[in-house]
Image (cartoon, helix red, strand yellow):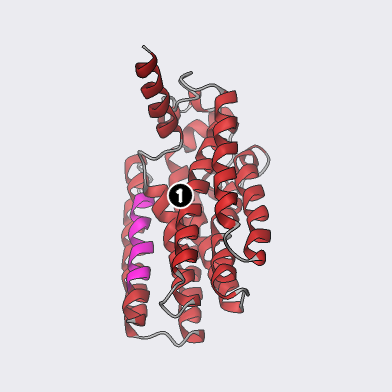
Amino acid sequence: MTKVYFLDRCQQYWLLMRFDKPIGILILLWPALWALWIASDGQPNLLVLTVICLGVVLTRAAGCVINDYADRDFDPHVERTQQRPIAAGKVSPKEALKLFAVLIGIAFASVLFLNGMTILLSFIAAFLIASYPFTKRYTHLPQAYLGIAFGWAIPMAFAAQINTIPLVAWLMFLAVALWAIIYDTMYAMVDKDDDLKIGVKSTAILFGDRDREIIGALQLIMLTLLIIIGQLQMLGFFYYLGLLATAALFIYQQTLIFHRQKDHCFQAFLNNNYVGMVIFVGLMINFW
């Protein structure tokens, strides 16, 4: 019985941390890798690379845990989230808080192997992760706050690699923040009807019938920022080939969300993993 209980606890914690859905890790990891490859001219320090990757995994898991804790009264009323461990009563809110503390603690301990600037930036990262889930109660722009939280990996990666945060890092931070608004609005379009009923705010609700046009505009701005980054860093053909592939993926995403069908909007969200991947592949080949 003890072994069965232990295995059940592990399974529920695994689900709570969303390790069964690695898309969240990947979509956060790709920009961190962009930043490391640009900061290091394609030769990142192995320790920095390891700590940043570990930090992405741990902080994403911690973010999922605190998100479900914050939404424990909302999730049972949303079709997509009813079976999450806290909503289904399989993990208590107290257990979730303990797990969040452990994950943040391990992530912070790993950052201690890096320089002082990165350690200081990690305090801001922890605050952003812990506070993000509560923003959907007070503003229709939680996706923008998520963008800041996810984008914070960019200055941290530059600081860890070169102990400074140049202009190109802040341009990339802005591009990643806009990207988060893009894909998380697509994600929020899936829950729009339920969110309206229970009073949860989102950019999908704020944008209304203009959601597709605003997403399209943000996609254009993001691509423009990435082109500017390429010019500033004097990146080559393969980087821009990656951006061309990104533009094609954005067009495809627009076709998916055109009729605002829930399953197609979710597919558009998932498709952003390929956006992160093609940009990173372009950077890797550029620095070979």
When the figure is inspected, residue 76 is found, relative to residue 238, above or below; the finding is: above
Residue 134 % position (x, y): 64, 38
Magenta stretch bounds: 268-281
Q: Is residue 269 magenta?
A: yes
Write down the quadrant of residue 41 in the picture. Answer: bottom left
Q: For the residue carrying disc 1, how many other residues have a C-alpha within 10 Å: few (<14), some (14-19), or many (20+)?
A: many
- What secondary structure characterizes most of the magenta part? helix
Residue 270 % position (x, y): 35, 50
Name the residue rendered at 42%, 50% in the picture: 25
Tell me, yes or no, if residue 258 can be seen here: no
When the figure is inspected, residue 158 is found, relative to residue 191, above or below; the finding is: below
User: Which is more toward the observer, 3 or 144?
Assistant: 3
Write down the quadrant of residue 149 in the picture. Answer: bottom right
Q: Is residue 198 magenta?
A: no
Name the residue rendered at 55%, 53% in the picture: 110
Q: Which quadrant of the rendered structure holds the C terminus?
A: bottom left
Q: For this view, does 7 lie left or right of residue 154?
A: left
The residue labelled by disc 1 is 57
> Please, what secondary structure does the residue beneath circle 1 have?
helix
Amino acid on which the number 1 mark rests in the picture? Val
Q: For this view, does 89 lie left or right of residue 145?
A: left
Name the residue rendered at 47%, 75% in the picture: 226
Q: For this view, does 250 lie left or right of residue 141?
A: left
Name the residue rendered at 47%, 76% in the picture: 38
Tell me, yes or no, if residue 162 can be seen here: yes
User: Which is more toward the observer, 216 or 151?
Assistant: 151
When the figure is inspected, residue 155 is found, relative to residue 142, above or below; the finding is: below
